[in-house]
Image (tube, grey):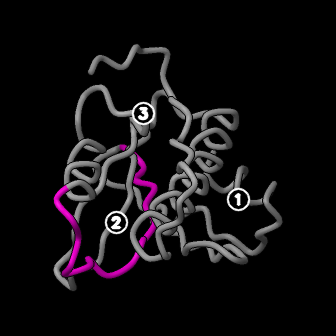
Amino acid sequence: MITTWLAQLGIASLNSAEDVFNITVDQGPNILFEKELGDWLMAARIGPCPRDLSQGKWLVMLQINGPFSPMAPFHITVDTAGDILLWSRISESEISLELLNLRYQALLEYYTYLDNFLYKEESTEAQVTPRTMTGSFNFV
């Protein structure tokens, strides 16, 4: 299913036996797809973990992994090199072209949000919070 979806994106010459695919997006992140224990991991490297984040930004970052996050089912982590990764797991049993397209678009949207939030100059305009992927309510 992954190879069919990647072919729809115009990525040819894929070996269906491969368990790792790396996609480079113009003006966006490198996206990694890796088969792991029967699931597919979709991940994007956001960038190095800033050393001077304010307490408010840290709280926003921690909230991303919370159960009521508007970015669910995406999570963040930091790799051994100190880079922030945005990732989501897709079960082999639930995978479909529609789900892959939805997660891909959400990953690009969340990448842009986090890139602006962490590395761009703060503006006086209110930042747009990413849309919720699930039908769950956000309790504050």
Q: Which residues are magenta?
A: 39-55
Q: Secondary structure at mark 3?
A: loop
Q: Nearer the N terminus, badge 3 or badge 1?
A: 1
Few, some or many residues within 10 Å of mark 2 (<14, 14–19, 20+): some
Q: Position of residue 36 (x, y in %)?
A: 32, 54
In the image, what residue occupies the spot 56% across and 34% down? 131
- Quadrant position of residue 83: bottom left
Q: Amino acid at mark 2?
A: Leu
Q: In the orientation shown, which residue stands out farthest toward the bottom?
A: 81
Q: Toward the viewer: 92 or 104? A: 104
Q: Earlier in the sequence, mark 1 or mark 2?
A: 1
Disc nearer the start of the sequence (3/2) = 3
Q: Secondary structure at mark 1?
A: helix
The type of residue carrying mark 1 is Leu
Residue that carries the numbered disc 1 in the rendered image: 6
Q: Quadrant of residue 56?
A: bottom left
Q: What amino acid type is highlighted by mark number 3?
A: Pro
Q: Is residue 70 magenta?
A: no
Query: Which residue lies under the disc numbered 2?
Result: 85
Task: Answer whether residue 82 is visible to the viewer in this image.
Answer: yes
Name the residue: 53% across, 41% down. Answer: 130
Residue plotted at (39% across, 36% down): 73
Q: Secondary structure at mark 2?
A: strand
Mark 3 vs mark 2: in front = 3
Q: Nearer the viewer, mark 3 or mark 1?
A: 3
Verify CB contact (< 8 Å) between mark 1 and mark 2. no
3 and 2 marks in contact (CB < 8 Å) = no
Q: Are marks 3 and 1 in contact (CB under 8 Å)?
A: no
Circle on res. 70 = 3
